[in-house]
Amino acid sequence: MLPAHMNTRNIMDPFTLIAGATAIYNSIKSSVDAGKDVMETAEKVGNLFSKVAQIVTIASTPRKKKMFQSQAEFEAEAVKIYAAKAKAQQMQLDVKNMFVGQYGPAAWEGIQRSVIEMRKEAARQAAAALKEQEENRKDLIMVSSIVGFLVLGIGAIGIFLMITVK
């Protein structure tokens, strides 16, 4: 099963993702090699790590052999996916090492704790929003029911009055 942030409309194949991740990694590496601070590439680092997570998730998802796909093609695809995952994880490790090289392991651990807290907070906010949405839906159903019964009651009274007044 895929994580909540990866619905089926956002899934790309791992080869497209690794191409994007490689481009981001090369941009980060060239920026750092040119003397820029790793922090100046923070958004790119975040994007790279997001793509790596997607690649790892896709690579970890069991694959089914496609119709008319030979066993050799199926196995070759599995090897390519594994290689894409390994390359992505290596790029992630290299970027981590660039950061640790500039700021030290304690800074990296601090950032990881911050990221975990941000993810937890985002999950809490998403859960609260979902709960509020569900409560709003229930309120709407209740109000609609009340209005429906009122309309039905007024209609019944109107019909009753029309029948008895004749």
Image (cartoon, helix red, strand yellow):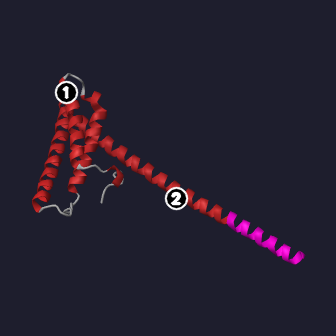
Q: Which of 160 and 94 is in front in this view?
A: 160
Above or below residue 21? Residue 33 is: above
Residue 155 horizontal/vertical position (percent): 76, 69
Residue 81 horizontal/vertical position (percent): 17, 51
Mark 1 element type = helix
First reached walking from the N terminus: tag 1 or tag 2: 1
Q: Which amino acid, mark 2?
A: Glu
Mark 2 element type = helix
Query: Which residue reaches farthest front?
Result: 68
Asked whether the viewer can see residue 7, the reply is no
Give the Cα separation between the discs numbered 1 and 2: 48 Å
Queried whether the magenta region covers residue 121, the answer comes back as no
Residue located at (23% from left, 58% from top): 61
Residue located at (15% from left, 43% from top): 87
Front position among marks 1 and 2 = 1
Q: If the image is split into quadrants, where does the N terminus sit? A: bottom left
Q: Which of 18 and 34 is in front in this view?
A: 18
Residue located at (35% from left, 46% from top): 119
Q: Which label sits on residue 134? A: 2
Magenta highlight range? 147-166
| Principal secondary structure, stretch drawn in magenta | helix
Residue located at (21% from left, 33% from top): 99
